[in-house]
Amino acid sequence: MDERWHVITLVRRNGDFDKLTFGLWLSTLGDATLYIGVVWYVARLEPMYLPVLGMVMLIPRILTMVGGWIVDQVDLRKLMIRLDILRGVCLLGASFILTGSGTDVRTTFLAIGCLAVISLGDAMYSPATMALLPEVLKQEDLLAGNGLLTTANHLARIGGQVVGGLTVFVLPLRAVLRLDAVTFGVSAVMLMLIRLGALNRLEVGKKVLTRELLSSWTILSRVPWLKVVAPASIAINIFFSVTMIILPLFIRRAYGGSALAYSVFLSAWSGGQILGSLTVPFWKRFKLHKATSYAAFLQGACFLIVALTHTLWVGLILFAVAGYANSSSNALKNTLFIERTPQGLRGRTFGFLGGFVQIGAPVAPLVASLIIAKYPLWTAWVVTGLISLTLGAIYLIFMERPIAESDSRAAT
């Protein structure tokens, strides 16, 4: 059988990757379950605090720029283990603080604080995961590995949303906190079982908050492709969020669809994403930068055609294909970024991109409101499609050359 079919066998061929994937899947499942529980709790009892919940989830994501710098200075596995244990202990402690029915303002802020702790941990955990991946996998397995991690993330979030929706009516909030704490404990154990040697990294000291941290912004000159990728990434993040915000209204106006049609569209998107992440090794027939570019082109083309069509089933198919292209593109570009970044700068690179892209997140609702009030709804789809095509061109033109061995050693 063609090697490109053997995506799933990667977890059998690489025991370390198996443990990493399972730990990430389980902790993400727990986080998604807790998120549904907390959001529903706040919406039901203290809806005025929903904006606060949004802010505590957003601000730590911007801090991934700081977290990425820390990641490049420490032992990755030990950092991730400590983050898992710390977050698990915090959630467990919070669950014992909750008493009675837990329907007061103190409980609300405690629940929001738990999500803040998780999100703060993710500011370092997410770039650490991407930096650890090439140390767990061989280079030829990176693409399949990114695809499987993307699949695991999609399945965990979908599963967490379902489990969260069911448990919120059955279990008290403190029980959901304890369940998530257990998932962090299991994730920490999985990381402990990964067989990695010492990585000879520096220990983080007081310099984290001094000139050395500020100097890490020189990454823009040390990783040149960031200068063109980062602004386009912010733009696509803003307008993709806009399309998702206005999607229910777009379905109703363009297709005459109902809430059921909206649900089917979201399911088609999720199904396309899972298929895209599972089949990402099929893109190996192209050079990596070209494959990443083609996937972005496909996504852009789908969005542009969606703006033009007024047939429900055509829009549904295009949305599923766009989900496929989006998921494939994410796995491909993560692999491309790893291979085009010196080893000692990978944490900072993913941290910078993760935090920098989130800066535009508060702008999306404002842009959506403007489009709804002043412009045709298809404007959002056209702009998103054009930005996707631009990103494809960037990957094709600016990211062709792999890093030299000397560049990688110099960065460390």
Image: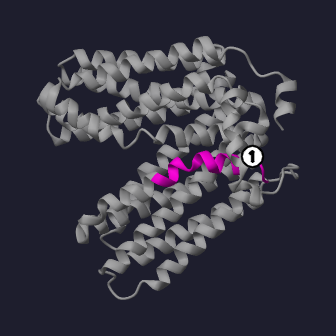
Magenta highlight range: 59-74
Colour mode? one colour
- Residue under label 1: 72
Is 371 one of the magenta-colored residues?
no
Q: Is residue 79 visible?
A: yes
- Residue 303 versus residue 47: which sits nearer the camera? 47
- Residue 19: give x, y in percent of width and height: 69, 53
* Quadrant where the image shows the C terminus: top right
Horizontal and vertical percent position of residue 357? 49, 37
Residue 21 image position (x, y, % from top left): 64, 49
Q: Is residue 279 above or below residue 43?
A: above
- Asked whether, in this view, residue 86 is left or right of residue 72, the answer is left
Crowding around mark 1 (Cα neighbors within 10 Å: few <14, some 14 to 19, many 20+) is many
**Residue at the far front in the pictured view:** 211
Magenta residues: mostly which secondary structure? helix
| Left or right of residue 288, residue 260 in this image | left
